C-alpha cells in the first residue's frame, strides 16, 4: 500500500519504490498515475513537488526508507542489501551510517577505483565533522567519497589538497594528513573570554547574532580580542575541537 510522501503535495510512494501523483492536466478528471524516474550512477531519482511549491529531485530509495522503515537511531544513510542501487524494494533497504556503508562496500569488493593505484585520486580520505572534528567516514579515494556521500568530487578534492574553507558541517582530509582540524569562528564572552558558540563562517555568525559580518571578519582577521568593548561578545578563528576516533 502506498504511503504519502511527507511534506509533498499529492505524491505517494509504495514498498516497491514506485512513485504516484495526481494527473490534473487538460481539464480531465483527476487520476492517479505512476511517475517516471531517472537514473544517475545507478540510483533512481524522481521529482517531488512540496508544499512550498518547489519541485525537488529525490533519491527513490530514501523515500521508501523514510515511508516504511523505522529509524530509531537517526541514521542518515540508506543502504542496499544486494548492492543493486536501482533495487528499491523495501526488503532490500536498511538505515545505516556512512562508516558502515563504506565498510560494506569494501567487504563486498565494490570500493575499487577504475584506475586502481595509478589513479591520482585513489589516496584514502577521511570525512570529519566541522564543529567537533569527529570522524564521520573513511573512503578509499576522493571518487569513492563522491559516490558514497553524493558530494561534489571537485569540492572533496580541493578540501583534501588545499584545505579550502568550508561552509558545510563536514570537511575532508587525506588519511595521512596531520592537520585534520578545520578552522571555525568562535564567539567569546567579552568579560570572561569563555567560548560560547562556534560557527562555520562569518555569514553564519552574523545571521545568528545580528552583528555585522564586516565586524566579525575584521575581528577574525586581527586575531586578537578587541581593545574596546562594543558588544557583549567578540569573535576569533579557532580550531575545531579534536576528538579521538571510536
Image (spheres, rainbow, N blue to C red):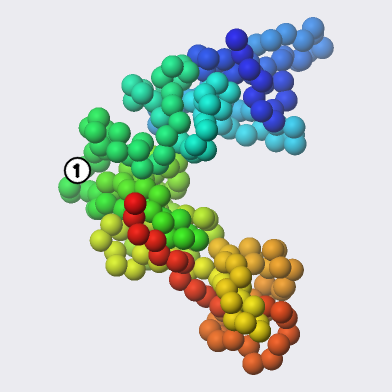
Would residue 196 be seen by someone viewing this image from the given angle?
yes
Q: Is residue 74 left or right of residue 143?
A: right
Q: Secondary structure at mark 1?
A: helix
Q: Residue at x 30, y 58 (%)?
A: 174
Using the image, determine if residue 119 lies above or below residue 131: above
Q: Quadrant of residue 11?
A: top right
Which residue is more in the foreground, 123 or 75?
75
Image coordinates for residue 150, horizontal then vertical, percent: 45, 41
Using the image, determine if residue 62 lies above or below residue 123: above
Q: Residue at x 64, y 24 (%)?
A: 5
Using the image, determine if residue 121 lies above or below residue 64: below
Q: Quadrant of residue 234?
A: bottom right
Image coordinates for residue 237, horizontal then vertical, percent: 52, 75
Q: Residue at x 37, y 47 (%)?
A: 137
Would residue 60 be seen by someone viewing this image from the given angle?
no
Q: Quadrant of residue 109?
A: top left
Q: Give the residue at mark 1.
A: 116
Q: Residue at x 41, y 56 (%)?
A: 134
Amino acid at each position: 500500500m502506498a504511503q504519502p510522501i511527507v511534506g509533498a503535495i499529492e505524491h505517494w510512494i509504495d514498498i516497491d519504490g514506485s512513485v504516484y501523483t495526481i494527473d490534473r492536466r487538460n481539464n480531465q478528471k483527476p487520476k492517479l498515475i505512476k511517475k517516471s524516474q531517472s537514473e544517475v550512477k545507478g540510483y533512481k531519482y524522481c521529482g517531488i513537488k512540496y508544499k512550498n511549491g518547489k519541485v525537488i529531485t529525490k533519491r527513490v530509495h530514501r523515500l521508501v526508507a523514510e515511508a516504511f522503515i523505522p529509524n530509531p537511531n537517526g541514521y542518515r544513510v540508506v543502504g542496499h542489501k544486494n548492492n543493486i542501487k536501482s533495487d528499491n524494494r523495501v526488503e532490500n533497504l536498511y538505515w545505516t551510517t556512512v562508516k558502515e556503508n563504506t565498510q560494506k562496500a569494501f567487504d563486498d569488493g565494490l570500493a575499487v577505483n577504475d584506475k586502481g593505484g595509478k589513479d591520482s585520486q585513489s589516496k584514502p580520505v577521511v570525512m570529519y565533522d566541522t564543529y567537533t572534528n569527529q570522524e564521520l567516514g573513511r573512503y578509499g579515494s576522493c571518487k569513492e567519497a563522491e559516490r558514497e556521500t553524493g558530494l561534489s568530487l571537485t569540492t572533496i578534492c580541493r578540501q583534501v589538497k588545499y584545505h579550502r574553507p568550508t561552509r558545510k558541517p563536514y570537511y575532508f582530509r587525506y588519511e595521512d594528513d596531520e592537520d585534520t582540524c578545520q578552522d571555525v569562528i568562535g564567539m567569546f564572552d567579552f568579560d570572561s573570554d569563555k567560548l560560547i558558540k562556534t560557527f562555520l563562517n562569518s555569514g553564519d555568525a552574523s545571521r545568528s547574532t545580528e552583528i555585522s559580518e564586516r565586524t566579525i571578519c575584521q575581528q577574525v582577521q586581527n586575531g586578537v580580542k578587541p581593545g574596546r568593548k562594543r558588544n557583549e561578545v567578540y569573535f576569533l578563528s579557532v580550531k575545531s575541537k579534536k576528538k579521538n576516533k571510536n
